[in-house]
Image (tube, helix red, strand yellow):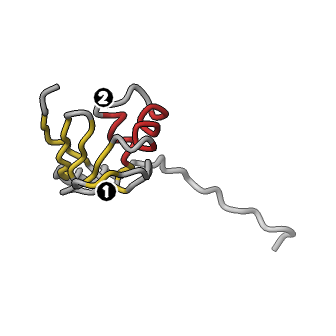
């Protein structure tokens, strides 16, 4: 198998290792991704990693079965603040006091 390398953009940090394996298609589902990690088939930054919930951040490099993933942080443009909602204006009725004047 040839060694394929690609960049993976994440929008938040940290991300659990098994989730990256799942979302990047290196495992069919979360359970399979966890099993790959537990079996010692995954390395992070050149060292075998057996913690499936290892916190991955930008700059980490994940390797599995000839695939290499370089993790980078995606820059997200700030979303504009939502426009204030217009609330219906209701007229308040004057309260009638108890008793008379």
Q: How many residues crowd around disc 2 within 10 Å: few (fewer than 14), some, or many (20 or more)?
A: few
- Identify which residue is drawn at 45% across, 31% down: 32
* Nearer to me, 19 or 10: 19
Q: Position of residue 82 (x, y in %)?
A: 31, 50
Residue 96: mark in rendering: none
The residue at which mark 2 appears reads as 25
Residue 13: mark in rendering: 1
- Quarter occupied by the N terminus: top left
Q: Position of residue 3 (x, y in %)?
A: 13, 33
Question: SS for tag 2?
Answer: loop
- Identify which residue is drawn at 18% across, 49% down: 74
Look at the image and tell me whether residue 13 can be seen.
Answer: yes
For residue 84, side relative to residue 51 (left or right)? left
* Nearer to me, 52 or 11: 52
* Nearer to me, 74 or 33: 33
Look at the image and tell me whether residue 76 can be seen.
Answer: no
Q: Nearer the viewer, mark 1 or mark 2?
A: 2
Q: Earlier in the sequence, mark 1 or mark 2?
A: 1
For residue 99, side relative to residue 22 (left or right)? right
């Amino acid at each position: 198998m040839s060694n394929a390398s690609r960049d993976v953009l994440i929008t938040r940090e940290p991300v659990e290792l098994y989730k990256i394996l799942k979302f990047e298609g290196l495992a069919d589902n979360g359970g399979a991704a966890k099993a790959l990690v537990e079996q010692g088939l995954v390395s992070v930054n050149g060292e075998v990693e057996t913690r499936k919930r290892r916190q991955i951040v930008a700059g980490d490099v994940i390797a599995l079965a000839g695939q290499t993933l370089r993790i980078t942080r995606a820059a997200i443009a700030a979303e504009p603040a939502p426009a204030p909602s217009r609330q219906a204006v209701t007229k308040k009725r004057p309260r009638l006091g108890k008793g008379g004047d």
